[in-house]
Amino acid sequence: MSHLTIRSTIALSNGVAMPLFGLGTYQVMVADIKKTLLSALDTGYIAIDTASSYRNEEAIGNVLKELFSSGRVKREDLFITTKASTSEHGYEKAMAGCEGSLKRLGLDYLDLYLIHWPGVAGNQPSAPINSTIRAETWRAFETLYEQKKCRSIGVSNYTVAHLEELFKHCKVKPHVNQVEFHPFLYNKDLLAFCQGNGIALEAYSSLVRADKDSFQDKVLTGIATTLNKTPAQVLLRWAIQKNVIVIPKSIKEERIKENANIFDFVISDQDMLALDGLNCDRRICWNPYTVA
Ligand SMILES: NC(=O)c1ccc[n+]([C@@H]2O[C@H](COP(=O)([O-])OP(=O)(O)OC[C@H]3O[C@@H](n4cnc5c(N)ncnc54)[C@H](OP(=O)(O)O)[C@@H]3O)[C@@H](O)[C@H]2O)c1
């Protein structure tokens, strides 16, 4: 484990190397994109996570264009993920959604394209139509993958039930499932199911969005103190020691560095178990179990 670095990757089921560590950009305002991205890239980040619904793809694209044309960074050295929103569900809309994201990002291809949410805009979460439409979305994703517009394709906020349903009709299994995942929401069953089926689990909100109750938890702060690390660093390291990809978000240079400084220590098996024991189903984001 201690040999991991900020550039370490895991092999997806199709052989694509995906960085275990990257930058989240939800709620990174357009005005903050440039300095945030430059701080991250200077620190060594090579992966960026965005989504059409974050409304910052174009700002990210503008920075990438500058970096590529100056020769400071090469396209192939970065791993860019974006997501089709709830209003980009369905075959035609997903095809157009990907084109739109590529255009805003100024890219010819995505490294990873995700279905953001199993539910479809305009439908009740419990409506069975969600399932029919998202199957069509996945068919578009398979076409985009075949056309090499996306090096890998995946889903986000899919439960085991959503994945089992997808397995019944898919030609390509999702390479990644991005979900809320941290010690306070340690969904062991979903982790085992994904990893057992060749789907890399990617965690979002790994820092529980710096929620006070979580950051001040005595078990977490005790382990952080012993290791001479911060609670944020312990939360991120806990995930990568489970082979789970992390994408912490910060717009502050010192935190961008702090979050990346997790490759010079190891959490012991005993402390990993103590962190596992913090699970209390504390969910700070949307609950996908409500979606039919
Ligand atoms: N697929 C999905 O449905 C979904 C949902 C949510 C998120 N995501 C993705 O996952 C990424 C990460 O999740 P997230 O943004 O929800 O939450 P997060 O990374 O858990 O936490 C971000 C929050 O923590 C603060 N923070 C960052 N580093 C810190 C540190 N070292 N110490 C104290 N506070 C710190 C940030 O504030 P400052 O910026 O002020 O530092 C921000 O308020 C997102 O940005 C997005 O790319 C995906």
Image (tube, rainbow, N blue to C red):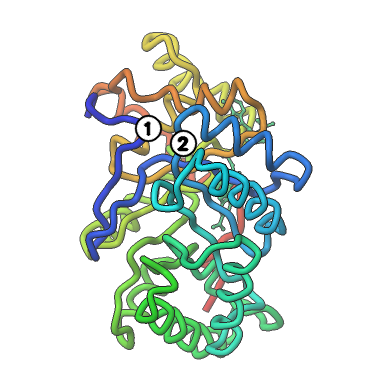
Find out whether the residues at labels 1 and 2 contact each other: C-beta distance under 8 Å.
yes
Task: Give the residue number, with chain letter if any, for mark 1.
Answer: 6
Horizontal side of 216 relative to 220 (left or right) equals right
Q: Which amino acid, mark 2?
A: Tyr
Q: Horizontally, is 183 left or right of 252 in the view? A: left
Q: Which amino acid does label 1 sit on?
A: Ile
Depth check: give the residue in front, 152 or 69.
69
The numbered mark at residue 202 is: none
Q: Looking at the image, which is closer to me, 53 or 196?
A: 53
Residue position for label 2? 45
Picture residue at 44% right of the left edge, 10% below the top: 225
Secondary structure under tag 1 reads loop
Ligand 1 rendered quadrant: top right
Q: Can residue 165 be seen in this view?
A: no
Q: Looking at the image, how many numbered discs can be counted on the residues?
A: 2
Q: How far apart are marks 1 and 2 (CA)?
A: 7 Å
Which comes sooner in the sequence, label 1 or label 2? Answer: 1
Residue 245: percent from left, percent from top: 38, 45
